[in-house]
């Protein structure tokens, strides 16, 4: 490798902040809560405080065949919440993370989406746009464990979405406008209709905000953004047994990356543009005991990061190890990532006798795209006066794909429901990797009200294909994550109120995580040699009266990793022993109440989190400290007026200031949103 490239990579590694032997302890900037090393000590363990809150929607998740199912009525679609809040406010073990991200059961991300039976491949890594907007969802089925062999790829959770559809009749729908603090203005329109053999549903959403991402200071600086989504679903009834469905959408976004006070004074201007589109064409054949789904799907996404060539990374206190790149000189980074997926998937099932339903299918997909990265270093010419600029460019095309097949059976002998099967996955990027994964999921009905379950799943989760690792030709290729997942649980139904308790454990090999190139939002995945996640979850939901519904959940989680860091820009050594993942939140809880009667509604929702880890111990152990705990309470009051609805809302009603994540080896500091008051009008037609 050239001296120039070595210098640039050394600077990139220092700025990225991935743990290695030369890093010193990260001094706590915030009041330090309990060190992770004492997490099991009753004298010092975090106090569990569950604050009574609620839910902006009357969404009571129901457990059906091992999945949590959420039904959104047409009135629910008129609320203004993103997909992240929908998940974190209803699903046990889902922790809200910065800028619309979320972590489920100690995972970094690793979610698989299905839309009307067709896969929806993920966007390029580093994207902040939602794949699916809640306004376009009719039913959301969420699996966080007990995965049938039918599901593959990223399996921290599966989001199986049935999109909203039009109905036979003249066009109908609503138009909506919301304005709130932080310069937020949301506009939405939905319309659907059709004839007996054909229906359509079309929606358009556009959002402006002066607080697009969670900022590095309590007061957002250089933090505006705009997003737009156009979605359509077209459903053709081809006869008594056949339907043809087309789902399609177009998204685009522009966002600024927040500054701190110093960067704002310098005029630092870092932005990102995102756009994408998808189209799924699905044929469904249902004929008695036989069912068949054939889906042709495509997804194109692009991300362009525009670093400031003058002020991006300015003032960084890092230098190359050989001294050729001095500290405190401006450095700029930029990239253009693209990924284009096209695939074909089949799912077939057939009932055999009275106790078996056999399912089988395959999924073939290819991906092409490119990774174009540029790093500009300002370098002292040697006399302390003159400077020169080194430009490091990594520009290469990407190609790869996935092949998978599965066979499974739902067997119902007596009170048992036994889902068992096996799947095969093959993933191709720089190298070809594969795995055979057995699955066994047992549910036993004790009586009309009580059930117990036990799951074992072997999981194979490939890494993102677009990366900047090729800057270093000696970097180790990414590896897929291979896990063993175990879960046991109990569910009790009593008078419309459902209570459940689960315990799970997952062993991980080649754990996939990511770090951020310091001072930017360029994200780079890497592997950690091994890890584990274990946790306990409690959930209760139901209706207290005809007009009052509620839900509550609590999760206790441990997510830890150990061993070598590999696959990133610069090969890394191993920290001393097991450390907590930066996305591990020990205690997560939420509770919701929703009252509706005669067009009037009062809704509350609340969320508690004990905080994500950061910092480094004196012995060099990453993520040794945790940010302080936080809780937020949200309120919405709405009333029907003629054919419209007027709603007043308050997010973070108590104006609780809190840091979601602190600056660490893996991410920058990001503050949660303060009190935000809003008013919304919805006009039905």
Image (cartoon, grey):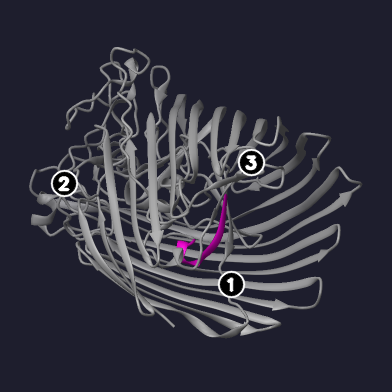
Frontmost residue, 319 versus 463: 463
In the structure shown, which secondary structural element does the residue marked by tag 2 occupy? loop
* Disc nearer the start of the sequence (2/3): 3
Q: Position of residue 482 (x, y in %)?
A: 60, 33
Frontmost residue, 359 versus 644: 644
Q: Tag on residue 66?
A: 3
Frontmost residue, 624 versus 446: 446
Name of the residue lying farthest toward the right: 353
Q: Position of residue 360 (x, y in %)?
A: 80, 50
Residue 400 placement, left or right of 499: right
Q: Which residue is mark 1?
A: 165
Q: Position of residue 245 (x, y in %)?
A: 67, 72
Mark 3 surroundings: few (<14), some (14-19) or many (≥20) residues within 10 A: many
Q: Tag on residue 329?
A: 2
Q: Is residue 135 magenta?
A: yes
Mark 2 surroundings: few (<14), some (14-19) or many (≥20) residues within 10 A: many
Residue 107 placement, left or right of 589: right
Frontmost residue, 279 versus 241: 241
Residue located at (76% from left, 46% from top): 406
User: Circles 1 and 2: CB distance less than 8 Å?
Assistant: no
User: Circles 2 and 3: CB distance less than 8 Å?
Assistant: no
- Looking at the rendering, in which quadrant would you find the C terminus? bottom left
Boundaries of the magenta span = 132-141
């Amino acid at each position: 490798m050239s001296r120039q490239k070595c210098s640039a990579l050394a600077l990139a590694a220092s700025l990225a902040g991935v743990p290695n032997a030369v890093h010193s302890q990260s001094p706590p900037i915030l009041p330090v809560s309990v060190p992770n090393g004492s997490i099991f000590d009753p004298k010092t363990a975090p106090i569990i405080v569950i604050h009574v809150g609620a839910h902006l929607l009357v969404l009571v998740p129901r457990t059906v065949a091992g999945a949590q199912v959420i039904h959104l009525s047409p009135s629910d679609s008129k609320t203004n919440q993103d997909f992240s809040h929908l998940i974190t406010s209803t699903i046990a073990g889902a922790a809200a993370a910065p800028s619309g991200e979320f972590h489920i059961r100690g995972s970094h991300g690793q979610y698989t989406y299905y839309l009307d039976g067709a896969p929806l491949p993920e966007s390029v890594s580093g994207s902040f746009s939602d794949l699916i907007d809640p306004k376009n969802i009719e039913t959301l089925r969420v699996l966080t464990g007990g995965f049938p062999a039918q599901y593959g790829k990223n399996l921290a959770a599966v989001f199986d979405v049935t999109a909203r559809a039009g109905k036979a009749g003249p066009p109908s729908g609503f138009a909506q406008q919301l304005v709130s603090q932080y310069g937020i203005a949301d506009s939405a329109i939905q319309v659907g209709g059709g004839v007996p053999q054909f229906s359509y549903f079309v929606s358009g959403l556009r959002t402006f905000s002066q607080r697009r991402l969670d900022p590095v200071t309590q007061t957002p600086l250089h933090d505006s953004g705009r997003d737009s989504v156009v979605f359509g679903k077209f459903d053709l009834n081809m006869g008594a047994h056949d339907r043809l469905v087309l789902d399609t959408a177009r998204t685009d976004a522009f966002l600024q990356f927040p500054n701190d006070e110093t960067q704002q004074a310098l005029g630092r201007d870092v932005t990102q543009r995102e756009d994408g589109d998808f189209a799924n064409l699905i044929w469904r054949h249902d004929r008695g005991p036989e069912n068949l789904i054939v889906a042709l799907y495509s997804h194109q996404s692009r991300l362009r990061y525009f670093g400031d060539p003058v002020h991006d990374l300015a003032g960084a206190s890092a230098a190359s190890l050989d001294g050729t790149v001095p500290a405190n000189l401006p450095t700029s980074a930029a990239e253009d990532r693209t990924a284009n997926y096209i695939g074909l998937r089949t799912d077939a099932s057939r009932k055999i006798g009275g106790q078996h339903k056999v399912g089988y299918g395959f999924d073939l997909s290819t991906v092409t795209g490119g990774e174009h990265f540029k790093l500009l270093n300002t370098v002292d010419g040697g006399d302390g006066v003159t400077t020169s600029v080194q430009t490091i460019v990594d520009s290469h095309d990407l190609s790869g794909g996935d092949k998978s097949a599965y066979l499974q059976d739902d067997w119902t002998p007596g009170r048992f429901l036994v889902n068992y099967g096996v799947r095969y996955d093959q993933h191709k990027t720089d190298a070809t990797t594969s795995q055979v994964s057995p699955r066994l999921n047992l549910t036993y009905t004790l009586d009309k009200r009580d059930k117990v379950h036990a799951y074992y799943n072997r999981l194979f989760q490939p890494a993102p294909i677009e990366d900047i690792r090729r800057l270093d030709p000696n970097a180790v290729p990414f590896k897929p994550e291979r896990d063993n997942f175990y879960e046991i649980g109990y569910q009790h139904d009593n008078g419309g109120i459902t209570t459940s308790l689960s315990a799970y454990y997952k062993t991980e090999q080649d754990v996939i995580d990511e770090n951020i190139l310091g001072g930017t939002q360029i994200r780079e995945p890497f592997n950690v040699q091994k890890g584990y996640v274990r946790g306990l979850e409690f959930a209760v939901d139901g209706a207290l009266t005809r007009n009052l519904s509620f839900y509550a959940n609590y999760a206790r989680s441990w997510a830890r990793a150990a061993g070598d860091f590999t696959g990133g820009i610069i090969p890394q050594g191993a920290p001393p022993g097991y450390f907590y993942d930066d996305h591990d939140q020990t205690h997560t809880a939420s509770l919701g109440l929703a009252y509706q009667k005669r067009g009037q509604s009062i809704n509350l929702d609340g969320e508690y989190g004990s905080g994500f880890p950061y910092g480094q111990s004196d012995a060099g152990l990453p993520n040794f400290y945790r940010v302080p705990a936080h809780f937020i309470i949200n309120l919405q009051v709405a009333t029907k007026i003629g054919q419209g609805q007027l709603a007043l809302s308050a997010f973070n009603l108590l104006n609780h200031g809190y840091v979601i994540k602190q600056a660490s080896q893996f991410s920058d500091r990001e503050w949660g949103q303060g009190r935000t008051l809003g008013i919304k009008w919805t006009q039905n037609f």
